[in-house]
Image (cartoon, helix red, strand yellow):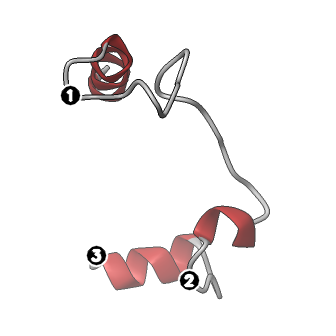
Amino acid sequence: MTLDKYMEVKFPNLELRPPLFYNWDVSIRFELGVDYDSNKIDENHSYLDEVYKRAIT
């Protein structure tokens, strides 16, 4: 089965357009890291280590 056919069967009449999260009745929201501070983020920050671990788990 192709992806297009699968999507039509499982999600009939679903129009995928941004922002998908707010345009669908069902959604899941979660945070990948903790203690986020945009002023303190760099590539060696522990926040990004936690995001990476949670994303691959």
Residue to which mark 2 is pinned:
17
What amino acid type is highlighted by mark number 2?
Answer: Arg
Q: Where is residue 38 in the image (x, y as percent from the top left)?
A: 48, 34
Quadrant of res 21: bottom right
Q: Distance between the residues labelled 1 and 2?
A: 31 Å
Which residue is more in the foreground, 6 or 21? 21
Q: Residue furthest left?
A: 44
Q: Residues within 10 Å of mark 2 (few under 14, many from 20)?
A: few
Label 2 secondary element: loop
Q: Are marks 1 and 2 in contact (CB under 8 Å)?
A: no
Q: Residues within 10 Å of mark 1 (few under 14, many from 20)?
A: few
What amino acid type is highlighted by mark number 1?
Answer: Glu
Please name the residue shown 56% across and 30% down the image: 31
Which residue is more in the foreground, 7 or 50? 50
Upstream in the sequence, badge 2 or badge 3? 3
Quadrant of res 52: top left
Upstream in the sequence, badge 3 or badge 1? 3
Upstream in the sequence, badge 1 or badge 2? 2
What amino acid type is highlighted by mark number 3?
Answer: Met
Please name the residue shown 55% across and 15% down the image: 35
Q: How far apart are marks 3 and 1 (CA)?
A: 41 Å
Task: Indicate which disc residue 1 carries.
Answer: 3
Which residue is more in the foreground, 49 or 9? 49
Q: Residue furthest front?
A: 39
Label 3 secondary element: loop
Task: Indicate which disc residue 43 carries.
Answer: 1
